Image (cartoon, helix red, strand yellow):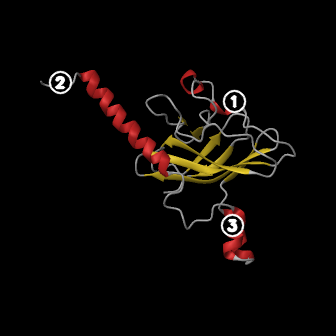
Amino acid sequence: MSVRFTTRARSGAVTLVVAAGLALGAAGCGGGGDDDKPKSRASASETRGSDPSAQEGQEEAVLAELKGRDGLVLTIESATRDAGGFVTVSGEIKNDGSEDARVPIETRGDETEIMRHGGSFGGATLVDSASKKRYYVLRDTDGRPLTTTNIPRIKPGETVPVFMQFPAPPPDTTEVTFQLPTFASGTIQISG
């Protein structure tokens, strides 16, 4: 028995391999290699003691703090260019309000393909003003956005870690505007 691939089958296999690579990259963004890195501001001050200069340095690590509705605040802590040709934006979402809050459904965006997969940050974009380009969240072959998904209700004072992956702008682009529906926009620096 001979096995032959049509052009369409080969294209599907290549797409599957690329999606699997991106999914593995997304799974790796959870912090596998960052075990020695502090997970929150509280743990940073606990590990560094009460040295004022260490605490000031921690505040500088925040790229942007974007206010949303119902007391939600999105803090972007990193935007890292990866060798695979994408940028991973990481941070946390905090409920600064006095009541439980949910991330608004509008953050998933309004594209039919993404909406099929529930709550996410699929509506996030990076805008490169210099090149006049907008970058949308990457997706796998099933149309699922490569972002944190299905965030539960957040209690007052609680934080939830979040990430989003985008195609990488050109290497000379180091500053972009981050946008997410229902949150203020902010300028962030891309490292790496």
* Residue with the mark numbered 1: 106
Q: Residue at x 70, y 41 (%)?
A: 185
| Earlier-in-chain disc, 3 versus 2 | 2
Residue 1, image quadrant: top left
Q: Would you say the residues marked 3 and 1 are in contact, meaning their CB atoms lie under 8 Å apart?
A: no
Instruction: Look at 50% across and 36% down and name the residue there.
Output: 138
Residue bearing mark 3: 43
In the depicted structure, whether residue 61 falls above or below residue 9: below
Q: Earlier in the sequence, mark 3 or mark 1?
A: 3
User: Does 97 sit left or right of 146 as displayed?
Assistant: right
Q: Secondary structure at mark 3?
A: helix
Residue 129 numbered mark, or none: none
**Crowd around label 3: few <14 · some 14–19 · many ≥20 (10 Å):** few
Compared to residue 80, the image places residue 9 above or below, namely above
Q: Identify residue for label 2.
A: 4
- Graded by Cα atoms within 10 Å as few (under 14), some (14 to 19) or many (20 or more), the crowding at tag 1 reads some
